[in-house]
């Protein structure tokens, strides 16, 4: 088709061959193949010029349009490969937004200003399902469902602590604050379908819900904030969540005996290849995490030679205890390749 269009534009096999960097005999043979395929003669050859036949006049316009569309499509693919355009969809836990994702996006946008970015702050369940369904490219969250078709790469861990109003009796507590110290105070918990709530429920020995009656629940830190504003209540959150948005209005103290950490994973679809643009933003995201100072007690789960697999949530002061095996059905945890 490109050969046909070049001859139609120039009116000369010689000029068209030069333009296409082909020999004239090769170009003539290509046009003959196209004529045989179409079943019609495409050019009338004279001693001075090559002219389109009546049957080929309309085909020139069609060929021109197809070639333009093809060249534009290839150009678009090349632009995507250079991250000059494209669309990235990210889902993150709300606590990852200001501390991790925002600085990574600033760095990414400086280098790739034409790429569209969609960000959704969701609970763990919605994040995992959106990646599983292919509506999100990747996520940052606490594992909840542990779907076997998803890969979980640990990147951060932050310690749990008590969150309470500044005038709460716990504010006067001296020394380390333990989980046992919370049992006589009114507790507000996150529901089991949240990553944080599910993690707390894995440790029944903490007995936060052992109060002899129903207690208040929240499905997000936003609704948790509203319940804490009722006064005299406490909750338990990881440090990054406690230092995000409205929750910074309250006091936060790390909890001990045992010391528990939330694990944040980069969640991706198993065996799904990344686009060049997604790979670039992931590289910037990992670089941002590795260069983070220890903020609010968060611990970076990496080493000098890259991210390392982890299957544990720390629960003791010295040596973290592994979660029960049934809590990890089919979970793949690996380094980012």
Image (cartoon, rainbow, N blue to C red):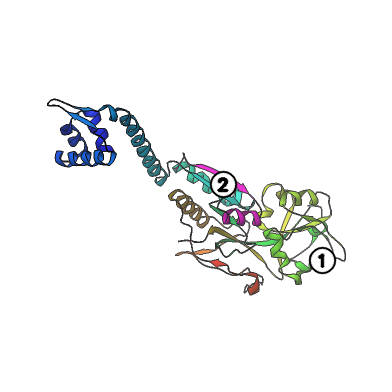
In the image as oriented, which residue stretches furthest toward the left? 47
Q: How crowded is mark 2: few (under 14 residues within 10 Å), some or many (20 or more)?
A: some
**Tag on residue 285?**
none
Residue that lies at the very extreme toward the top in this rendered image = 48
Quarter of the image that includes the N terminus: top left
Residue bearing the label numbered 1: 183
Task: Tell me the number on the disc at residue 102.
Answer: 2
Identify the image quadrant of the C terminus: bottom left
Residue at x-position 18% and y-position 38%: 28
Quick check: is 124 in the magenta stretch? yes
Q: N-terminal of the two: label 2 or label 1?
A: 2
Query: Mark 1: which secondary structure?
Result: loop
Q: x%, y% of residue 141?
A: 61, 57
- The reply to whether residue 58 is in sight is yes
User: Would you identify the image quadrant in which residue 139 lies?
Assistant: bottom right
Q: Which residue is drawn at 87% across and 63% down?
A: 213
């Amino acid at each position: 088709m490109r050969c046909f269009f070049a001859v139609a534009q120039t009116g000369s096999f010689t000029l068209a061959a030069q333009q296409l960097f082909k020999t004239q005999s090769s170009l003539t043979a290509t046009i003959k193949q196209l004529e045989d395929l179409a079943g019609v003669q495409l050019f009338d050859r004279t001693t001075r010029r090559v002219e389109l036949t009546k049957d080929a006049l309309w085909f020139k316009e069609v060929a021109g349009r197809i070639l333009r569309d093809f060249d534009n499509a290839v150009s678009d693919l090349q632009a995507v490969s250079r991250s000059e355009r494209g669309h990235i969809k990210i889902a993150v836990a709300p606590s990852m937004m200001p501390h991790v994702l925002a600085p990574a996006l600033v760095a990414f946008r400086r280098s790739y200003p034409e790429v569209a970015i969609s960000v959704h702050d969701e609970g763990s369940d919605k994040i995992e399902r959106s990646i599983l369904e292919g509506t999100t490219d990747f996520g940052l969250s606490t594992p909840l469902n542990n779907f076997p078709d998803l890969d979980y790469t640990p990147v951060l861990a932050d310690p749990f602590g008590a969150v309470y109003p500044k005038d709460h009796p716990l504010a006067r507590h001296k020394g380390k604050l333990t989980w046992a110290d919370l049992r006589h105070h009114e507790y507000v918990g996150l529901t089991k379908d949240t990553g944080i709530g599910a993690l707390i429920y894995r440790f029944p020995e903490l007995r936060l819900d052992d109060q002899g009656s129903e207690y208040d629940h929240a499905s997000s830190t936003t609704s948790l904030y509203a319940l804490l504003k009722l006064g005299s209540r406490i909750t338990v959150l990881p440090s990054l969540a406690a230092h995000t948005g409205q929750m910074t209005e309250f006091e936060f103290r790390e909890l001990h005996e045992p010391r528990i950490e939330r694990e944040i994973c980069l969640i991706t679809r198993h065996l799904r290849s990344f686009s060049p643009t997604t790979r670039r933003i992931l590289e910037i995201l990992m670089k941002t995490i590795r260069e983070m100072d220890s903020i609010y007690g968060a611990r970076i789960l990496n080493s000098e030679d890259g991210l390392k697999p982890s299957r544990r949530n720390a629960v003791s002061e010295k040596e973290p205890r592994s979660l029960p095996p049934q809590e990890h059905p089919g979970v793949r945890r690996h380094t980012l390749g």
